[in-house]
Image: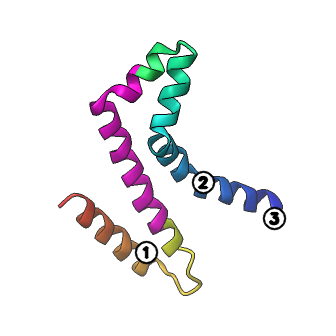
């Protein structure tokens, strides 16, 4: 049981793995430039790469929200599929 709970917590924290670098991009840029990590600092300076990171973080946020909705004790396959379809209609319309 403890293993399953720790795995579940890691799944929840995956969304923050994508959002944290964006939130800390200024600080990371200072550290990478100070340590001669040109490829990392070039990534953080590139607007196109940052837009991709933000887009990925947004997708993870939506998936995390959907995942938490599935943990309702009264959840069934019909309700879950309706929530999934609604999420994808909102994301891609």
Q: Quadrant of the N terminus?
A: bottom right
The image quadrant of residue 13 is bottom right
Secondary structure under the numbered disc 3 in the rendered image: loop
Give the residue at mark 1: 80
Give how far apart the Cα atoms at labels 2 and 3 are: 19 Å
Q: Residues within 10 Å of mark 1 (few under 14, many from 20)?
A: some
The image's mark for residue 13 is 2
Residue 61 percent location from the top left of the image: 43, 58
Q: Residue at x 52, y 32 (%)?
A: 28
Q: Viewer-proximal residue, 31 or 68?
A: 31
Q: Decide whether the magenta segment is chiefly helix, strand or loop.
A: helix
Q: Viewer-proximal residue, 59 or 41?
A: 41
For marks 1 and 2 on the same chain, the one whose residue lies earlier in the sequence: 2
Question: In this rendering, which labeled residue sits more in front, label 1 or label 2?
Answer: 2
Q: 12 left or right of 69?
A: right
Q: Are marks 1 and 2 in contact (CB under 8 Å)?
A: no
Give the magenta range: 42-66
The image's mark for residue 10 is none
Q: Residues within 10 Å of mark 3 (few under 14, many from 20)?
A: few
The image's mark for residue 1 is 3
């Amino acid at each position: 049981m403890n293993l399953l709970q720790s795995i579940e917590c890691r799944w929840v924290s995956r969304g923050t793995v994508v959002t944290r670098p964006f939130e800390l991009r200024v600080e990371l840029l200072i550290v990478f430039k100070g340590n001669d990590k040109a490829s990392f600092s070039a990534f953080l300076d590139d607007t196109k790469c940052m837009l991709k990171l933000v887009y990925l973080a947004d997708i993870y946020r939506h998936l995390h929200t959907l995942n938490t909705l599935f943990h309702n004790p009264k959840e069934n396959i019909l309700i879950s599929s309706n929530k999934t379809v609604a999420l994808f209609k909102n994301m891609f319309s």
